Amino acid sequence: MSAVPEPLLELVDVRAGYGAIEVLHGVSLALHPGAVVALLGPNGGGKTSTLKICSGILPVEQGEFRLAGRVVNGADAADLARLGVCTIPEGRGVFPNLTVRENLWVATGTGTSLRALEEAAYQRFPVLGKRRGQLAGSMSGGEQQMLALSRALGTAPTVLLLDELSMGLAPRVVTEMYEIVAQLAGEGLSILVAEQFARAVLPIATSAALMLQGRVVRTGDPHEIDRELSTSYLGG
């Protein structure tokens, strides 16, 4: 019987907040290599704060944040980026007043050449090659997400954090974006997705966790959670 691999990213009884207000009340979560974990729940449930812990923006007050078994409490966003953690925040995170090519150039600070970034981006998303001189803010929401993904993948991450990938996108585009996420997982990337609309991400997730009021109240197989949980707070 083969041993279960150690989680690549793990939160163990994590508590955190903003000032005197605690918003995460003992969150435990595990992301294994090559997995897609769907972090589900309504707005205000703690999903984005959990991703902020994982990206080094929000500090751990109690508990442990681990990467590959190593406790990394206190590591900031730059430290975690060097360790292979990359985040695409809510709202896509592109520079709207820069062109596609200039947005990719920003990612060269990680040490990857612009030529390599462009080659990888345009091969994966040919439409970006056609838009290379276009201002990012003038592109469609789906194209902006493609650009955000291209910038993130240019850093050769091992862990990708996605916050509300579906926000502002047409249903057809959401389906296409999650098909791309599934392809990335198939290539070995480990992905944690915070998503309000469960139906968007559950088809490609390997496991799911439901957050309510700053706590993970249910984890399990995506299909079981899809059947069991009310669409009144997961979204249609």
Image (cartoon, helix red, strand yellow):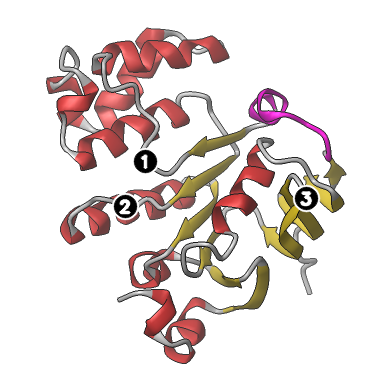
Report the Cα–Cα distance between label 3 and label 1: 27 Å
Residue at x 49% of width, y 55% of height? 193
| Mark 1 residue type | Gly
Relative placement, left or right, of 26 versus 219 is right
Identify the magenta region.
73-82
Q: In the rendered image of this protein, does residue 101 appear above or below residue 80? A: above
* Magenta stretch secondary structure, dominant: helix
- Asked if one can make out residue 6 in the rendered structure from this viewpoint, the answer is no
Question: To which residue does mark 3 refer?
Answer: 20
Question: To which residue does mark 2 refer?
Answer: 167
Residue 133: which numbered mark, if any?
none
Report the Cα–Cα distance between label 2 and label 1: 7 Å
Report the Cα–Cα distance between label 2 and label 3: 30 Å
Relative placement, left or right, of 60 versus 95 is right
Circle 3: element type: loop
Q: In the rendered image of this protein, does residue 202 appear above or below residue 170? A: below
Mark 1 nearby-residue class (10 Å; few <14, some 14–19, many ≥20): some
